[in-house]
Amino acid sequence: MPIDLEYLDYINGQLSEFGDFEYKKMFGGIGFFRGKIFFAGIMNGVFRLKADETNIPDYAAYGIGPWKIESRNMTMPYYEVPEEIVADKTRFAEWAAKAFEVALRAKK
């Protein structure tokens, strides 16, 4: 799937309150990093954040489950961010910060 540069620009702008981060092309999508810690991505055209038991309830409140890769019959610990969260820069930054903390814990 080609990368939607307009969507990438939108996500970058909405993450402005999150602080410093980088992104790069990977696996046909875009990976988002703070330092060398991968915490989010645009995967199959959807922005997803890393999750564990500490922030899964945030997604469950919106009826969102983990990313399912049907072709491999597997799930990944990345969850689609509801548009109302993406649209609110402050809340989006809070969700991104939680995902970064999840990624840090997973790295240890």
Image (cartoon, rainbow, N blue to C red):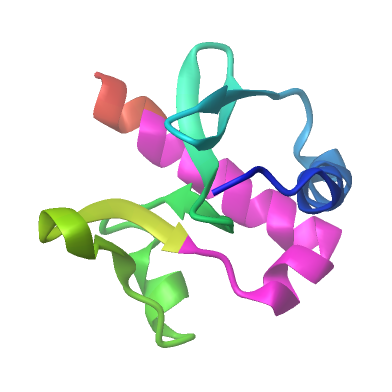
Please determine whether, in this image, residue 61 is positioned above or below residue 80. Answer: below
Residue 7 percent across, percent down from the top left: 78, 53
Magenta-highlighted stretch: main secondary structure?
helix
Front residue of 106/33: it is: 33
In the image, taking residue 62 as reference, residue 103 lies left or right, namely: left
- Residue at horizontal 34 percent and vertical 57 percent from the top: 54
Please determine whether, in this image, residue 56 is positioned above or below residue 74. Answer: below
Please determine whether, in this image, residue 9 is positioned above or below residue 73. Answer: above
Magenta stretch holds residue 27: no
Magenta stretch holds residue 89: yes
- Residue at horizontal 85 percent and vertical 50 percent from the top: 6
In the image, taking residue 33 as reference, residue 27 lies left or right, namely: left
Name the quarter where the C terminus is drawn: top left
Res. 86 image quadrant:
bottom right
Res. 70 image quadrant:
bottom left
Front residue of 89/67: it is: 67
In the image, taking residue 93 as reference, residue 35 lies left or right, namely: left
Residue 50 percent across, percent down from the top left: 41, 47
- Residue at horizontal 60 percent and vertical 21 percent from the top: 34
In the image, taking residue 34 as reference, residue 75 lies left or right, namely: left
- Residue at horizontal 66 percent and vertical 43 percent from the top: 3
Front residue of 67/88: it is: 67
Front residue of 26/76: it is: 26
Which residue range is magenta in the image? 80-103
